[in-house]
Image: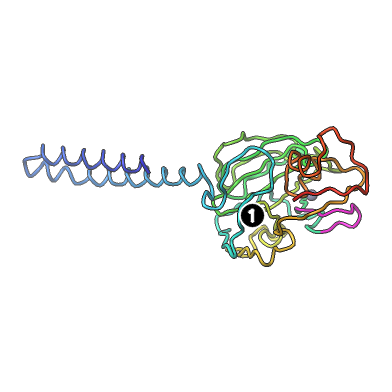
Amino acid sequence: MFLKFNLKSVLVATLAVFSVSVQGQDLLARQAPIDKKMRAIDSVSLQRLIGNELLDNPAGDLYQEWSNQHVHHYNVKLPEEYKIDLRNFCMPTPSRKITSKYGWRRSFGRFHYGIDVKVYTGDTIFAAFDGKIRVVRYERSGYGKYVIIRHPNGLETVYAHLSKQLVTEDQIVKAGQPIGLGGNTGRSSGSHLHFETRFLGRAINPAEMFDFEAQDIVRDYYVFRSSKNKSVAKSGGGVHRVKSGESLSSIAAKRGTTIDRLCKLNGITRKTILRPGQILRYS
Ligand SMILES: [Zn+2]
């Protein structure tokens, strides 16, 4: 806002000086196009400034914090209803082939929080909306190389199993900008893109918004309702039964919390060996 005011006052001052110095009729006539041009430049710069300001703190009214940690847990009250604008989207990949849907996976005995789209190693992956890169990390037993972007529409999008990340944390990106290359890193068999859409940490089925087959959005606006998301939105008293192969980090990611919080809640340390069947509190 400061810059916006500053720019305007500079413009006003410049015009004022100009008008004062102008005496003759022909000078006034010549002033008109200059005035017009300056006005055009002014509005473009203003728009650019306002745009970058929005992207500098995307959805700042919803998210109280900005962190480069992979925390899918936000200690904020969910709005009853929130309208998410999907209109200025870009499909993260031109691939139309879904290899695994969102939801409970019986074969793995766990919930799949995203959608898997077939891509080949090296295929370009694009930002779904304008936004700011929140996380660029590597998780050996989970997401592999992944990127999380926070968008002004309130969503956070996750792109996982990449072979290469092309962005850095805190970088501002535009919808359609390349952010990584498809791959097979982390817990993945066969190259694919694991894509998640989250709102204040709560996973939403990406198929409610993106139709990869049609390469289009499903609707212009997705309305998030906390009543509809009660099962995942509930706070307090959550317990997790450890399954074989799970680690504190995979449980933390799955339950939308952090390893430190799991340790604190359960009186354990990062070095504690988990056994299948063990019950852990996560909230
Ligand atoms: Zn997946």
In the image, the segment drawn in magenta is: 104-113
Q: How many marks?
A: 1
Q: Is residue 235 above or below residue 159?
A: below
Residue designated by label 1: 199
Q: Residue at x 41, y 42 (%)?
A: 49
Extreme residue in the left direction: 24
| Percent coordinates x, y for residue 161 in the rendering | 77, 41
Residue 58 is left or right of residue 243, and the answer is: left
Estimate the x, y position of residue 233 in percent, counting from the top left. 70, 59
Q: Position of residue 28 (x, y in %)?
A: 12, 44
Viewer-closest of 7 and 174: 7
Asked if residue 66 is among those painted magenta in the image, a careful observer would answer no
Disc 1 packing (10 Å; few <14; some 14–19; many ≥20): many
Q: Is residue 194 above or below residue 80?
A: above
In depth, the one of 272 and 81 nearer the eye is 272
Choose between 232 and 16: the one closer to the eye.
232
Say what amino acid the circle numbered 1 marks. Phe
Query: Which residue of the protein is positioned furthest toward the front in this rendering?
Result: 267
Please say whether residue 111 is one of the residues in the magenta stretch: yes
Q: Nearer the viewer, residue 200 or 176?
A: 200
Spot the residue most to the bottom. 227
Q: Quadrant of the N terminus?
A: top left
Task: Report the residue at 64% width, 59% height from top.
Answer: 216
Image position, residue 94 (x, y; %) = 69, 50
Q: Is residue 11 left or right of residue 182?
A: left
SS under mark 1 = strand
